[in-house]
Amino acid sequence: MPEVLKAPLVVEFPFTRSLGPVQSAFLTGLREGVVLGVRTADGRTLVPPVEYDPITAEEIRDLVEVAPTGTVTTWAWNHEPRRGQPLDTPFAWVLVKLDGADTALLHALDAPGPDAVRTGMRVRVRWAGERTGAITDIACFEPYEGTAELTGHSGRFEEMVTGIVAPARLDYVYSPGRAQTGYINALSGQRTVGERCPSCRKVYVPPRGACPTCGVATSEQVEVGPRGTVTTYCIVNIKAGHTANLDIEVPYVYAHIALDGADLALHGRIGGIPYDQVRMGLRVEPVWTEGGRYPDHYRPTGEPDADYETYKELL
């Protein structure tokens, strides 16, 4: 059988958001070791708090303190903690209805094993040693048979948390299907191939195994390029990163390029020409680096620019 291709991929970025009065009070409370909920017009207390009643859509601002102790309503055991999770040893994900709350809060429970966890067990908050005003100020929950006294806090603090930065990260393994495997294997030989739709006869690059217009399966492989035409482009003025394939001096141009014989433009970086001289219709060709798995960039061929009529349908 042919080798199944796969590659680990990571999508990661910092997500910055400002906080409204309810979320600000909740996170500031965690920093101060107080758990706050919000009371709805019909008397329900929601934890974690939200700014609008999920049933009536009314705005709600009535903050109320709840206890750091509560009851597990449901749970699932995590045998293999991942990077960035609350604990680095096996633990239980639990929904905990804190005393005084009508909804449950999701967090981790530190327990010696799944046999030590049950629905209905009593737990309490274990506070983090250093608290900054984030959900991670609750380090986890731990088993506890007692109850806790409320402080009577009003939810008003002198120095409020007004914003948070939440790192978002997705780790996954990508495995291409038949069509993209053929495309990747062709690139290793410095060739670009697409697939032709048996219905509309258009050639799509990169191929996906089905025509995006007709919805029918594709299998006829067609070599395209290597030359192509810039259909549209943008000038990049912000440095994207510091990895080998992103550490490029700005400004530079990223373009959609319609390879000769293709009916769909792919994207690539334009080099070998000042950024302010790149234009629609510019004829380009790929530049490969030694051992490269795909073109490093595209450069002008020196041919006359393509007529707009020849690529307008590919914009």
Image (cartoon, rainbow, N blue to C red):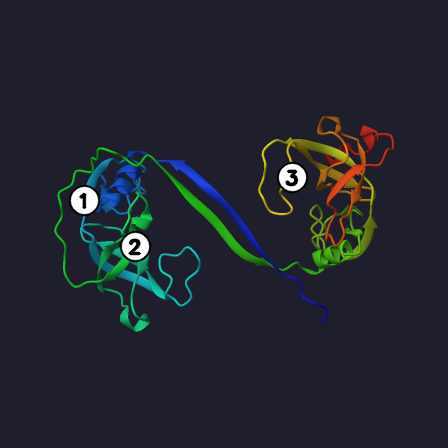
Does the residue at mark 2 contact the one at mark 3 (Cβ under 8 Å)? no
Instruction: Give the class, few, some or many, for how many residues have Cα within 10 Å of label 3's Cα (few <14, many ≥20).
Output: some
Amino acid type at image mark 1: Glu
Residue sitting at the far right = 303
The image shows residue 287, relative to residue 92, as above or below, that is above
Amino acid type at image mark 2: Ala
Nearer mark to the viewer, of 2 and 1: 2
Tell me the number on the disc at residue 122.
Answer: none
Q: Label 3: which residue?
A: 248
Amino acid type at image mark 3: Ile
Helix, strand or loop under label 1: strand
Q: Residue at x 70, y 45 (%)?
A: 213
Disc 2/disc 3 C-alpha distance (Å)? 40 Å
Nearer mark to the viewer, of 2 and 3: 3
For the C terminus, the quadrant is top right
The image shows residue 218, relative to residue 131, as above or below, that is below
Spot occupied by residue 295 in the image (x, y as percentages of width and height): 75, 47
Nearer mark to the viewer, of 1 and 3: 3
Q: Label 1: which residue?
A: 65
Spot occupied by residue 10 in the image (x, y as percentages of width and height): 55, 52
**Picture quadrant of residue 50:** top left
Tell me the number on the disc at residue 139.
Answer: 2
Badge 1 or badge 3: first in the primary sequence: 1
Residue sitting at the far top = 276
Helix, strand or loop under label 2: strand
Q: Residue at x 22, y 33 (%)?
A: 158
Instruction: Give the class, few, some or many, for how many residues have Cα within 10 Å of label 2's Cα (few <14, many ≥20).
Output: many
Disc 2/disc 1 C-alpha distance (Å)? 19 Å
Badge 2 or badge 3: first in the primary sequence: 2
In-front residue for pair 250/96: 250
Q: Residue at x 20, y 52 (%)?
A: 68
Does the residue at mark 1 contact the one at mark 3 (Cβ under 8 Å)? no
